[in-house]
């Protein structure tokens, strides 16, 4: 069965509730009349405080799905400042991004923490979008593949084949994030194939064929068609270009031109 593409917008620390609501109403107008069979899975990841209001707009429409940008692995207790998976599910999240390079870099998120988050997310029936990627130094030192492989092995440790097949991975070379320098599509596809091989070793053929692996890093309307034309790229995790309806819809449109 072909894998359903995903176009996910990671808003990072952007948009007030009012702005998030305006964006979502605008996006809904543009994409919700499109035939679901050709529309990719469209996911938006606002900041925590906007999730409830955005969900009020999209629930029932089934054309836009909601993601959080982070979560905690415990379900309740003395963990000041954290948000549990079931709380995110309650406000409509069906996806949660984990292990983004910004969280690894600025908030000291380790592979072990990412694995705990992945397990908690899957236990609640939510889908993790597990990010991985190398720095420019690692790439120049020829360590890209070994680094990504170890990130994936650690993130998926002790997770069942069935849960792995439902998960989503995003390959985001750190030097391509927010820099305007997209990774060459053929090279991104090569790394993504290597990730799929790694998944195959861990969880077998079925999981490797089912898992969706996205590319992220300066994706724009002008780059998406070439990216989606690659054999193993199942969609995109988009930062900067997901912040206006026009450019995000342009990316969705480009994806449909290739995959519909
Ligand atoms: P970018 O961010 O599209 O702005 O490069 C991607 C991401 O960090 O997920």
Image (cartoon, grey):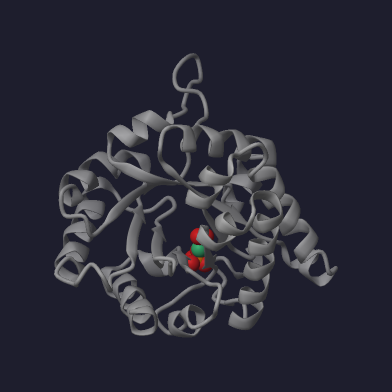
Q: Residue at x 55, y 78 (%)?
A: 231
The residue located at (85%, 68%) in the rendering is 141
> Residue 177 is drawn in which quadrant?
bottom right
> Quadrant where the C terminus lies?
bottom left
Q: Position of residue 35 (x, y in %)?
A: 19, 72
Q: Position of residue 16 (x, y in %)?
A: 29, 48
Along the line of sight, the residue nearer the viewer: 216 or 39? 39
In front here: 98 or 49?
98
The image quarter in which residue 241 lies: bottom left
Front-most of 91 and 3? Answer: 3
Could you tell me which residue is drawn at 59 percent across and 63 percent down? 172
In this figure, what is the number of numbered marks?
0
Residue 143 is left or right of residue 200, and the answer is right
Q: Is residue 20 above or below residue 1?
A: above
Q: Identify the residue shown where x is 66% and y is 60%.
A: 133
Q: Is residue 85 left or right of residue 159?
A: left
Residue 14 percent across, percent down from the top left: 38, 53
Q: Is residue 35 above or below residue 14?
A: below
The N terminus lies in which quarter of the figure?
A: bottom left
The vertical placement of 115 against 11, above or below, is above
Q: Is residue 260 above or below residue 103?
A: below
Q: Which residue is at the far right? A: 141
When asked about the image quadrant of residue 174, the answer is: bottom right
């Amino acid at each position: 069965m072909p894998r359903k593409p995903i176009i996910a917008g990671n808003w990072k620390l952007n948009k007030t509730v009012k702005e998030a609501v305006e964006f979502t109403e605008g996006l809904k107008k543009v994409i919700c009349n499109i035939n679901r069979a050709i529309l990719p899975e469209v996911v938006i990841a606002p900041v925590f405080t906007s999730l409830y209001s955005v969900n009020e707009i999209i629930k029932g429409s089934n054309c836009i799905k909601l993601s959080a940008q982070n979560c905690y692995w415990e379900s309740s207790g003395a963990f000041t400042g954290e948000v549990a998976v079931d709380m995110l599910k309650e406000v409509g999240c069906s996806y949660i991004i984990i292990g983004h390079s910004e969280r690894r870099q600025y908030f000291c998120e380790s592979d072990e923490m990412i694995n705990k988050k992945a397990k908690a997310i899957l236990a609640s029936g939510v889908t993790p979008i597990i990010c991985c990627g190398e720095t420019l130094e690692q790439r120049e030192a020829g360590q890209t593949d070994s680094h990504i492989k170890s990130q994936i092995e650690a993130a998926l440790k002790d997770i069942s084949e069935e849960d792995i097949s439902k998960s989503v991975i995003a390959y985001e070379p750190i030097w391509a994030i927010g820099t305007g320098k997209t990774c060459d599509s053929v090279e991104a596809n090569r790394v993504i194939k290597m990730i799929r091989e790694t998944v195959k070793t861990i969880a077998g053929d079925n999981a490797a064929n089912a898992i969706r692996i996205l590319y992220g890093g300066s994706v724009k309307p002008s780059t998406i068609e070439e990216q989606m034309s690659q054999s193993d790229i199942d969609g995109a995790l988009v930062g900067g270009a997901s912040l206006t309806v026009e450019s995000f819809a342009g990316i969705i449109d480009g994806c449909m031109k290739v995959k519909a």
